[in-house]
Image: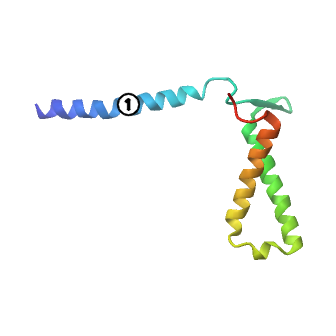
Amino acid sequence: MKMLFRIDALRRLLWPALSCTTMLAAGGCARGPFAPSVVVFGSYFPAWLLCAALGIITTVVARLVLVHAGIDEHLPVPLLVYLSLALTSSIACWFLAFGGTPH
């Protein structure tokens, strides 16, 4: 009787987790407005990857400008500032290229 109770409790715990994992994994397979692709040199790349690369490049250029201007040494938490700048410029690139959030 105890073994049957353990298996039933285990089944009740694992079934929702397995269902959610399957739905999340299958949701990434759909080709729709949530995952646009960009053709680069004849290959399809995810658009978020291109926007992230442009955000990093923008941040590197901004850091060079800030170092040259002497502002970099006065930043309170440089890692957080540059991470925020990279994220903000990546999101701005996404909004400019794809017109906002997907519907």
- Looking at the rendering, in which quadrant would you find the N terminus? top left
96 over 79 or under it: above or below: above
Q: Residue at x 89, y 71 (%)?
A: 68
Q: Residue at x 73, y 30 (%)?
A: 36
Q: Quadrant of residue 81?
A: bottom right
Q: On the image, numbered disc 1 is attached to which residue?
A: 16
Q: Residue at x 75, y 30 (%)?
A: 37
Residue 63 in the figure: left or right of residue 15: right
Q: Quadrant of residue 44?
A: top right
39 over 71 or under it: above or below: above
Residue 60 image offset from top left, x and y in percent: 82, 59
Residue 66 image offset from top left, x and y in percent: 84, 68
Residue 103 image offset from top left, x and y in percent: 68, 27
Report the residue that reaches farthest toward the top: 31
How crowded pointer 1 is (Cα within 10 Å; few <14, some 14-19, many 20+) is rated as: few
Front-most of residues 56 and 101: 101
Residue 9 in the figure: left or right of residue 30: left
Residue 47 in the figure: left or right of residue 27: right
Report the residue that reaches farthest toward the left: 1
Residue type at the position of mark 1: Pro
Q: Residue at x 74, y 54 (%)?
A: 86
Please say which color scheme the image uses.
rainbow
Residue 64 image offset from top left, x and y in percent: 86, 65
Find numbered disc 1 in the image and state the secondary structure of the residue it sits on. Answer: helix
